[in-house]
Image (cartoon, grey):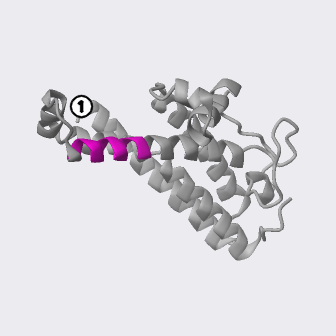
Amino acid sequence: MSSFPHEGDGAVALVEHFGSRLFLIFSYFFFSVEFKKDKIFIEDFVKESRPDIRGFCVATIQAACLTTTLMAIRDLDDFLTPRDCRKRRSWPDDLKASDLGFKEGLVFLTKRERERINKIIMHSTVTGVENYDASWDIQELTSKCVSQSLHFLSWVKTNYPSNKHSKVWAAAVFYTKLIEMVLTYAKKVNASNI
């Protein structure tokens, strides 16, 4: 177990850190929504044969959002892996759901998904060079991450009741509500084809 305090403000900070990481998984989704609204630019950029600074900017933002999403997904998979898991090494200062007493393993990435993120996104590798234009099933990866994360937050709300751990419970409720809000928004976006 790490030396991070897991009661009181330490537990609140752990849940809040988890929640802030959880929101990063939506970076690519938000990019896609915001830049799909800019149809005239996208159409002009596709037709344009010469370099365009705005096109470079959009491509950079897109790559940053994709990288952020994939890194956050991998990070949360680590967080939801118990500290005592023999298949994955933990460092003493890693934050883990198990540090709060959560015993369940909620690993959601397959070995192949995790390896691809590691080799193509997390580290500079030959595999990354060879797969610079790799495709990712962001919706699938995000869905698995959200499902397991909501399960963990539900556990926090149950095991850190408001009458004893009001700040921890409130943080779990807050992040659950925000995730539900994003999911509702995503359904509206998909339904309206924005």
Q: Is residue 58 above or below residue 139?
A: below
Image: magenta residue range: 54-64
Residue 32 shows in this picture: yes
> In the image, is residue 2 part of the stretch drawn in magenta?
no
Q: Quadrant where the C terminus lies?
A: top left
Q: Quadrant of residue 29?
A: top left
Q: Residue at x 84, y 35 (%)?
A: 87
**Can you see residue 164?**
no
* Residue 126, image x, y percentages: 61, 29
**Residue 134 image position (x, y, % from top left):** 48, 25
Q: Was residue 57 drawn as part of the magenta stretch in this picture?
A: yes
Residue drawn at x 12%, y 34% as measured from the top left: 44
32 or 101, which is in the foreground? 32
Question: Going 83% across and 68% down the picture, which residue do you hit?
Answer: 3
Q: Kindly identify the amino acid type of the residue bearing the numbered disc 1.
A: Asn
Residue holding disc 1: 193
Note whether 32 is above or below 174 in the view shown.
above
For the N terminus, the image quarter is bottom right
Examine the image and state in which quarter residue 114 appears: top right
What crowding class fits label 1: few (fewer than 14 Cα within 10 Å), some (14-19), or many (20 or more)? few
- Residue 180: x percent and y percent? 45, 48
Give the overall secondary structure of the magenta segment.
helix
Q: Position of residue 128 (x, y in %)?
A: 56, 31
